Amino acid sequence: MPKTKYIFISGGVLSGLGKGAITASLSLLLKAHGYQVMPLKCENYLNLDAGLINPIEHGDPFLCEDGAETDMDIGTYERFLDINLGRENFITMGQIYKTVIDKERNFFYRGEDVEAIPHVTDEIISRIKKVAETSQAEIVIVELGGTAGEYQNALYYEAARIMKLKYQDTVVHVHVSYLPTPPHLGEPKTKPTQLSVKLLNSMGIQPDFIVARADRMIDGRRTERFALFCNVVPGHIISAPDVENILELPLVLEKQQFSFKILAQLGLSQTPAKLSQWRRLVQLIKQPKKQTVTIGIVGKYFATGDYHLTDSYAALIEAINHAVWHQKVSLNLKQLNAEKIIGHAQDFLADCDGIIVPIGWGPRGVDGMLEAIQYARENKIPYLGLCFGMQLAVVEFSRHVCHLAKAHSTEVDPKTPDPVIHMIPEQERNMKARAYGGTMRLGAWDCRVVPDTLAYQAYQTTLTSERHRHRYEFNQAYLKQLTKAGLVISGRSVKENLVEIIELPQKDHPFFLGTQGHPEYKSRPLKPHPLFLKFISACSEYRRGVKS
C-alpha cells in the first residue's frame, strides 16, 4: 500500500472560523477524487472526551456509533463524508497526557525523564498514524483545535512540525485565517493573517496553503499581499467567503481547484472529482419552496449571558434542515428558551406547526418543556421528543391522562411518588461510585419496532438502531397503567427489552412520538433520517390544515 499522506489544518486570528467546515469540505473533495480519506480532530482541553462538558461551554457533544462523546466537528465530518467515525478520530490533550503518565507509571519509558518533547509529541504522532493504519486511509486530515499561538495546543503544532520534518512530501499544512473588513475602512485587512503566519513560522512551520476566510471572495491585491508577506505562492491562496449554506463550501473551493492543488503538492494523481450528487443537493436546497413550516425547539441550552446559542443543538438543527430540504419546504425555526415558556405556552407555540423537545439534563427548564408537550398533545400539533423529550412526554402523559399528578423522572424529583422515569440499577451503581465519565448508555443500540405504528411507518423495518446518551429509562412498573390509558410502546431495545420509542395512536394525534435514541446524530444531508422526514411531513400536513 502507498505511503499515507497527511494534511494538517490550523487556524489563526480567532476560533470559530470554520476549520471544521474546511476540513470536512476538503475531505469530501478528496473522497470525490476517489481517495480513501480519514479526518480527525485534535482538541486542546484536558477532558478525556466531551461527555461532561456543558453544551453552553463548547457546543453540542457529538455522539458516535461506538459511544465516543466527541467534538461537534466530528459530526460535520460524518455528514459531509457519509461515514461513521469514532473515538480514534477524536484526540484531546487530556487523553494524551493520561496515556503518557500511565505509561510512565508502568515503566514503559525504561527510566527516561519523561518530557513534553519528545514523549507527548510522540504520543500525538502515534495516535495520528494509528488512524491511518486502522482505517487504511490514503489521506489523513488532521484539524488542530484552537488558533496558532495558544499555549494549550503548542504540542499539536510541534507534532505537525516533526511530521513535516520526517516525512517531507507526505505532509501538507493548510492555514485557515480571517480577513476582517472594518466598516470604517471598507476593505479586508491581511495583517491579522500575516501575524498568525509569523506565529506558525516561529514554531518552525511554513504553511503550504492559506485559506482566507472573509465575508467575500478575496481580490488580487489581497492575494499579492499574502504571497509577499506569508511566503505562499499566489495559486495556493484559497478564498473561503461566507456562503448562504455551508454545503456550498466544497463547490466554492473546487472552483478554485483547491483539491487538485493539494493532490499535486502531495504528488498524487488528479482524476476529476465526482460531485454531481452534491451539486444536485445544493440545487435542491436553493429551489424556491411553496410552503413554510414553523418548528419550535424548546430547549434549555440556548441562553448564554446576553447572547443566544445555536451550537448547543447543532446536530438537531442539521437533521431538521436535511428533512425540510428533501420534503421541499422552507423552515422557520423558533429556538425557544424553556424557562421563558412557563405559564406562556400559548404565546410562544401558537404559530408552531411542529414542536421538538430535545436532550437535556437536570431540573432547569423542565416545567416549560412539560407545558410545551402538553400544548402539543392537546392541540394535536406534531411532536417529536428526543431522549429527555421522550422521558418528559411520558411524565406529561402520566400526569394529565393517567392522573398521576406528581409523576416525574427521578432525575428531576428523586422523591416523586410515581417515578415513571427512573435510573436502572446499573446506572445507580455508577452514580454511587461517582463514575460519571463515559458510563451512560452510549453508542448504537438495536431496537425492535412494532409493526403498524407511527415508528414503523417512518423506519419501514422492524429492526433499527439509534445512538444513545442517557442514564434514565422508562419505568416498567407503570407499563400496564400507561398503555391502558392509550400510550403506545412502539419500540424496545433488543438486548435489554427497555422501552425505546413511545407514541400516541394516530386516531388520537397526527404525530406524537418520543424516542430514547438520538436520530439527529445519524442524519446526513444526502440521507435524511426517516423520523425527521416523517415528522416534517406531518408538520407540512398540519400547516395545510391550518391554512384551510
Image (cartoon, helix red, strand yellow):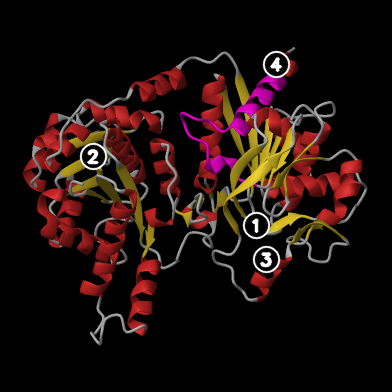
Residue 181 visible to an observer of this rendering:
no
Q: Which residue is mark 2?
A: 212
Residue type indicated by callout 2: Ala
Instruction: Give me the C-alpha separation between circle 4 and circle 3.
Output: 45 Å
The image position of residue 215, as x and y in percent, is: 31, 34
User: Along the line of sight, which residue is nearer the eye, 367 or 488?
Assistant: 488
Tag on residue 532? none
Mark before the other along the chain sequence, 3 or 2: 2
Q: Residues within 10 Å of mark 3 (few under 14, many from 20)?
A: some
* Disc number lying in front (1 or 3): 3
Tag on residue 361? 1
Dot 4: what SS?
helix
Q: Residues within 10 Å of mark 1 (few under 14, many from 20)?
A: some
Q: Residues within 10 Å of mark 2 (few under 14, many from 20)?
A: many
Residue type indicated by callout 3: Gln
The image position of residue 87, as x and y in percent, is: 43, 56
Mark before the other along the chain sequence, 4 or 1: 1
Residue type indicated by callout 1: Trp
Residue type indicated by callout 4: Arg
Q: Which residues are magenta?
A: 517-543
